[in-house]
């Protein structure tokens, strides 16, 4: 059974995604290229897995990579409003520049909780690089740390999207594009 049959519309093709990820990689490389201390890229599991893998291959700097996990959606499409860190960093980020790599910033609950967490761990700056930004759904406004910047691949319409790492009930992460499911599959 092909996954494509579950998709009502494709919002971003694999080709468009690849082009934008390459641009983001160049932008972040330029931003940190004069810095003697290259950043730690922290992928927010599980959703950012594909974006992180593609993005870091476009960064021409001696970076480190780590993962963190914060869950708030369970198997549904609505945030429970209080993300819980269920898997923490392996690396010490004290006095390090951190680039938090997210698949999507929606209500802002997850990224806000993670920025707070990185602040407590004494990162010298925290930037956010999100593949999608859904500002129409924002509930929490977050402040970046130090010289941190906000990088966004694309603005996402107010729809629950899947693919390129993003799931509905843990499915569809492996789609190479971003799409919206047919209504009968959001159940
Ligand atoms: O801005 P927010 O409303 O907090 O939504 C964004 C977060 O929601 C998803 O994570 P989820 O908790 O579903 O875990 P997952 O990455 O394992 O899918 C997504 O990967 C982001 O981390
Ligand atoms: O639109 C979305 N799709 C998948 N996961 C998400 N987490 C927050 N918003 C979304």
Image (spheres, helix red, strand yellow):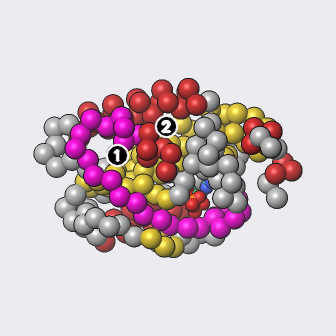
Measured in 3D between alpha carbons, the distance from the residue under mark 1 to the one under mark 2, in whole angstroms, is 13 Å
Judge the density around disc 1: few (<14), some (14-19), many (≥20) Cα neighbours within 10 Å. Answer: some
Was residue 65 drawn as part of the magenta stretch in this picture? yes
Which residue occupies 57% across, 48% down? Answer: 165
Was residue 62 drawn as part of the magenta stretch in this picture? yes
163 and 96: which is toward the camera: 163
Q: Main secondary structure of the magenta part?
A: loop
177 and 96: which is toward the camera: 177
Q: Which residues are magenta?
A: 55-79
Q: Is 144 left or right of 39, judged from the image as shown?
A: right
Q: Which residue is mark 2?
A: 153
SS at mark 1 in the image: loop
Residue 121, placed above or below residue 177: below
Q: Tell me residue 83's x, y (percent).
A: 53, 70
Identify the mark at residue 149; answer none if there is no mark. Answer: 1
Q: Tell me residue 58's x, y (percent).
A: 36, 34
Which residue occupies 42% across, 63% down? Answer: 68
Judge the density around disc 2: few (<14), some (14-19), many (≥20) Cα neighbours within 10 Å. Answer: some
Identify the mark at residue 5; answer none if there is no mark. Answer: none
Q: Tell me residue 136's x, y (percent).
A: 62, 47
């Amino acid at each position: 059974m092909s996954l494509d049959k579950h998709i009502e519309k494709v919002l971003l093709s694999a080709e468009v995604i690849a082009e934008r990820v390459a641009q983001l990689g160049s932008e972040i490389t330029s931003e940190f290229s004069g810095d003697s201390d290259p950043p730690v890229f922290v992928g927010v599991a599980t959703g950012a897995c594909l974006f992180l893998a593609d993005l870091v291959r476009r960064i021409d700097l001696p970076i480190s990579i780590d993962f963190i996990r914060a869950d708030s959606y369970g198997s549904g499409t609505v945030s429970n409003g209080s993300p819980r860190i269920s898997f923490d960093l392996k690396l010490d980020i004290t006095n390090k520049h951190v680039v938090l790599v997210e698949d999507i910033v929606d209500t802002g609950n997850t990224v806000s909780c993670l920025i707070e967490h990185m602040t407590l761990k004494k990162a010298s700056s925290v930037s956010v690089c999100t593949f999608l930004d859904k500002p129409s759904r924002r509930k929490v406004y977050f402040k970046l740390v130090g010289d941190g910047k906000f990088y966004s691949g694309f603005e996402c319409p107010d729809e629950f999207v899947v693919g390129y790492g993003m799931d509905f009930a843990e499915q569809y992460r492996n789609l190479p594009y971003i799409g919206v499911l047919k209504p009968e599959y959001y159940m």
